[in-house]
C-alpha cells in the first residue's frame, strides 16, 4: 500500500515539471509509467523496488548493460581529469583517443569525425556536409536528397524532412524540404527503384541517405545485406554521395560492428549515436570520408569552412566511456554473443510467436525484433496492450503502433531470450481476448 503511494507520488511530481517525448501528457500518468530509481545489469529497478528486464535497451541505446563496472570506472577516471572542453578550434585528449580508436573500425575511408550529442544532430550535420560538399566545388544544383519510405532519421526539421511521414511529422509539411522518395523496406523492390531514381535524377542529387539493413522506427523492416551493394554502385556510377545512418544499427546491434560491414559497403558519410557510449552519455558523430573532408579545406575563415558545431560535441566524459566501450566489445567477444542469441531468438520466435493467429509477421535482424500484430480492426491498440501486459510481467517492451518491438542488450543471455519470447507470446494471447 505504501509502495503504491510511493509510485503515484513520483508520477505526480514528474507530471508537475516534465514533458515526455513522444508522449501524450494527458494520459501519461494513467499509462502506468515506470519511474526508475536505479538499475543492475539488464534490469531497471523502480521507486518501489520492482524489477524490469530492459528488453528495449532504453530505446536501443544500452549495449552491455546498466552499471557496468568497467564503464563506470572509465567515467570516474575521466572525471579526475576533465568533464568537458570545447571542440570549436581546440581539442581534448579523451576525444582524440576515442576518435583514433573508432576511425579505423568505421567502414569509411580515412574517416574524420564531427561529434554531436544526438542522432538527429549527426544526421543534420551529414545533410549539411553533403550539401556544402558540392557547393565548395562550384556545383550549385545538387540540392536534393534521396531517402526511403518508412525512413526515420530523427526529429529535427532537417531529419524529419529526410524521414518519411508518420509519427506526427505530416503536421510540419510546410517546414519540411522536399526529397526524392524511394519505397520503404517493406517493398522488396525498394533498392531497385532507388537505383533507377538515382540514374534518372543524379544531376540534382547531393546524396542518398539510408538505414542500412534495418529500418528501425518503421517497425523493424529488414532488407537482405547483398541488396545494398547495388545502391552503393549506383551512387558511385552517378557520383552521388552515400550517407549511411547507423544510429540504430551501429555498434553491434545487428551482429556486426556496423551494418555497413555486413552489407560490404563504404559510405561517404556515416552517422552513429545511440550505442556509441554503451548508452551511458549523450554522444553522436558524423564520419566523413577523406574525399568529403578534403572538399572543406581552404583559407582560414574562408567559405569552404563548415560553420557548424554543437556546444557539448566531443564531450570528454562521453568520449572516455565510448573508448572503453569499444574495447569491451572486443574483450568480451560481444558480437559472437549477439549472433548466438539472435539465432536463439529466431528459433524461439518461430516456435512460440510466429504461429499465433494474432501475429501477421515476425521480422528480425540480430537483436532487433518486430512482431507485427494482426488486429481484426483499426483502433484496438493491440501494440500498446501487449506491451503493457509484458511490463506487468516485468519485461519492458515498447510498441511502434501494432508492431511489438524487442531490442535486447548485446549481453543478453539464453535465459533472457526465453523470458522475453515467452512473455511476448503470453501477452499477445492475453491482449487478444
Ligand atoms: C534514433 C534514431 C535517430 C535519432 O537519434 P536521436 O539520438 O534520438 O536524435 C536517427 N536515425 C536513426 C536510424 C535512429 O534510429
Image (cartoon, helix red, strand yellow):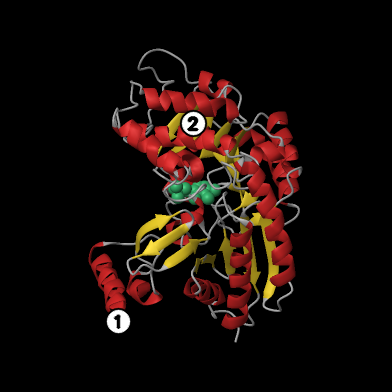
Q: Residue at x 35, y 23 (%)?
A: 92
Task: Name the one closer to the observer, 151 or 333.
Answer: 333
Position above or below: 190 against 23: above
Is residue 75 visible to us here?
Answer: yes
Residue 144, picture quadrant: top right
Q: Is residue 150 above or below residue 361?
A: above
Residue 417 badge:
none
Report the residue at 58% width, 39% height from top: 332
Picture coordinates of residue 402 (x, y %)?
Answer: 58, 71
Q: Is residue 310 visible?
A: no
Residue that appears at 39% across and 41% down: 72
Q: Nearer the viewer, residue 376 or 46?
A: 46
* Quadrant placement of the C terminus: bottom right
Residue 127's x, y, as percent? 50, 37
The image shows residue 110 at horizontal and vertical percentages of 58, 21
Q: Residue at x 52, y 65 (%)?
A: 397
Cα separation between marks 1 and 2? 56 Å
Residue bearing mark 1: 1
Residue 242 in the figure: left or right of residue 38: right
Q: Secondary structure at mark 1?
A: loop
Q: Earlier in the sequence, mark 1 or mark 2?
A: 1
Q: Nearer the viewer, mark 1 or mark 2?
A: 1
Q: Residues within 10 Å of mark 1 (few under 14, many from 20)?
A: few
> Which residue in the protein does label 2 denote?
129
Amino acid at each position: 500500500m505504501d509502495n503504491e503511494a510511493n509510485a503515484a507520488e513520483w508520477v505526480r511530481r514528474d507530471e508537475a515539471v516534465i514533458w515526455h517525448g513522444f508522449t501524450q501528457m494527458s494520459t501519461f500518468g494513467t499509462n502506468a509509467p515506470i519511474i526508475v530509481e536505479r538499475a543492475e545489469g539488464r534490469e531497471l529497478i523502480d521507486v518501489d523496488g520492482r524489477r524490469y528486464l530492459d528488453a528495449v535497451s532504453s530505446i536501443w541505446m544500452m549495449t552491455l548493460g546498466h552499471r557496468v563496472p568497467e564503464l563506470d570506472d572509465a567515467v570516474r577516471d575521466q572525471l579526475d581529469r576533465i568533464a568537458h572542453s570545447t571542440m570549436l578550434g581546440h581539442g581534448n585528449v579523451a576525444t582524440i583517443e576515442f576518435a583514433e580508436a573508432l576511425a579505423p573500425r568505421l567502414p569509411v575511408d580515412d574517416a574524420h569525425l564531427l561529434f554531436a550529442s544526438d542522432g538527429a544532430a549527426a544526421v543534420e550535420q551529414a545533410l549539411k556536409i553533403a550539401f556544402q560538399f558540392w557547393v565548395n566545388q562550384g556545383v550549385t544544383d545538387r540540392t536534393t536528397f534521396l531517402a526511403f519510405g518508412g525512413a526515420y532519421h530523427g526529429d529535427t526539421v532537417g531529419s524529419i524532412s529526410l524521414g518519411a511521414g508518420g509519427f506526427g511529422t505530416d503536421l510540419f509539411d510546410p517546414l519540411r524540404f522536399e526529397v526524392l522518395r524511394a519505397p520503404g523496406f517493406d517493398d522488396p523492390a525498394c533498392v531497385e527503384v532507388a537505383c533507377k531514381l538515382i540514374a534518372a535524377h543524379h544531376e540534382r542529387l547531393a546524396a542518398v541517405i539510408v538505414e542500412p539493413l534495418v529500418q528501425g522506427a518503421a517497425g523493424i523492416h529488414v532488407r537482405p545485406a547483398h541488396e545494398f551493394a547495388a545502391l552503393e554502385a549506383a551512387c558511385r556510377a552517378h557520383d552521388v554521395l552515400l550517407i549511411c545512418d547507423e544510429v540504430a544499427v551501429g555498434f553491434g546491434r545487428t551482429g556486426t560492428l556496423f551494418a555497413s560491414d555486413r552489407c560490404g559497403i563504404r559510405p561517404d558519410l556515416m552517422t552513429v549515436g545511440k550505442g556509441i557510449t554503451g548508452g551511458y552519455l549523450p554522444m553522436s558523430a558524423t564520419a566523413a570520408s577523406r574525399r568529403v573532408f578534403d572538399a572543406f579545406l581552404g583559407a582560414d575563415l574562408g567559405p569552404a569552412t563548415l560553420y557548424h558545431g554543437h556546444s557539448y560535441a566531443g564531450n570528454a566524459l562521453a568520449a572516455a566511456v565510448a573508448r572503453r566501450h569499444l574495447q569491451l566489445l572486443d574483450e568480451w567477444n560481444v558480437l559472437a554473443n549477439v549472433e548466438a542469441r539472435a539465432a536463439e531468438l529466431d528459433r524461439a520466435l518461430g516456435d512460440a510467436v510466429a504461429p499465433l493467429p494474432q501475429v501477421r509477421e515476425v521480422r528480425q535482424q540480430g537483436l532487433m525484433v518486430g512482431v507485427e500484430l494482426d488486429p481484426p480492426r483499426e483502433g484496438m491498440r493491440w501494440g500498446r496492450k501487449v506491451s503493457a501486459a509484458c511490463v506487468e510481467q516485468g519485461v519492458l517492451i515498447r510498441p511502434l503502433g501494432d508492431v511489438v518491438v524487442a531490442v535486447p542488450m548485446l549481453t543478453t543471455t539464453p535465459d533472457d531470450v526465453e523470458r522475453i519470447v515467452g512473455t511476448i507470446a503470453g501477452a499477445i494471447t492475453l491482449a487478444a481476448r
